[in-house]
Every structure is written in C-alpha cells, then in structure tokens.
Image: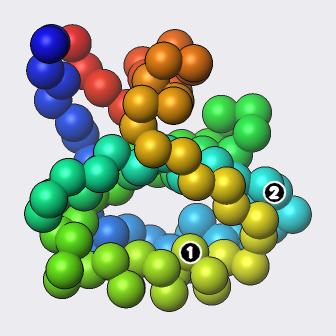
C-alpha cells in the first residue's frame, strides 16, 4: 500500500471564525481518515472550491472539533476515508501528497 504525507492544520490552530464566514449557506463534506490516535479529515464544500485539511489527537481534541463543526451551523455530511479516496480523485489530490 502506498503511503501519503498529509499537510494538515491542527484543529486547535485553525481559524474557525474564518471557516464559518466562508461557508455560510453551504453544505459541507467531512471526509475522515480514522486511526487509533492521530486523526485526519478534509472539510470541503460540494464544489471543492474551499477545503480545509485538518488533524487532531483523538482523545484530546475530538470533542473540540465536534463543537467547532456544530458552531458552523451548516449541514455537514461525513464519510470515512475509504469512501472518498475511491470515489473522488479531486478530494484525494487535495488531501494527499505523492
């Protein structure tokens, strides 16, 4: 299996107010790469014109991430990594470096 290097912001370092301002009235997709401790996710709008690649430590920051996503006040659909990696080359390219 080929490994990829992620370039992601830590969820506690993201400017969530800016994300909220840029996503007013949008429907978002959250693609999550689940692991034991270090989690990665790509948050994007349906057109893939706005994307945020993020990472967090599961036990330490998962509840913080959920609070921030709820505060966006927009519909968010979530998928595991396998679903978006296999079906969307655009998402895969946006989130991984070969």
Assign a secondary structure to mark 1: helix
Q: Which mark is residue 26?
A: 2
Tag 2's secondary structure? loop
- Is 27 located above or below residue 83 in the figure? below
Number of disc labels: 2
Tell me the CA gap for discs 1 and 2.
13 Å
Between 50 and 28, the one lying in front of the other is 28
Asked if 1 appears above or below 19 in the picture, the reply is above
Quarter of the N terminus within the rendering: top left
Residue 95: give x, y in percent of width and height.
37, 32
Q: Residues within 10 Å of mark 1 (few under 14, many from 20)?
A: some
The residue positioned 69% from the left and 45% from the top of the image is 45
- Residue 90 sits in which quadrant? top right
Residue 33: which disc?
Answer: none
Crowd tier of the residue under label 2, counting other residues whose Cα lies within 10 Å: few below 14, some 14–19, many 20 or above: some
Q: Is residue 96 above or below residue 64?
A: above
Q: Which residue is mark 1?
A: 69
* Percent coordinates x, y for residue 51 in the rendering: 54, 44
The reply to whether residue 71 is in sight is yes
């Amino acid at each position: 299996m080929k490994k990829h290097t992620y370039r992601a912001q830590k969820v506690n370092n993201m400017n969530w107010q800016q994300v909220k301002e840029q996503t007013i009235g949008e429907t978002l997709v959250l693609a999550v790469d689940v692991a034991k401790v270090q989690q990665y996710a790509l948050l994007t709008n349906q057109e893939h014109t706005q994307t945020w690649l993020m990472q967090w430590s599961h036990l330490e920051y998962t509840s913080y991430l959920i609070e921030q996503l709820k505060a966006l006040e927009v519909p968010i659909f979530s998928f595991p990594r396998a679903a978006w990696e296999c079906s969307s080359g655009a998402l895969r390219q946006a989130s991984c470096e070969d």
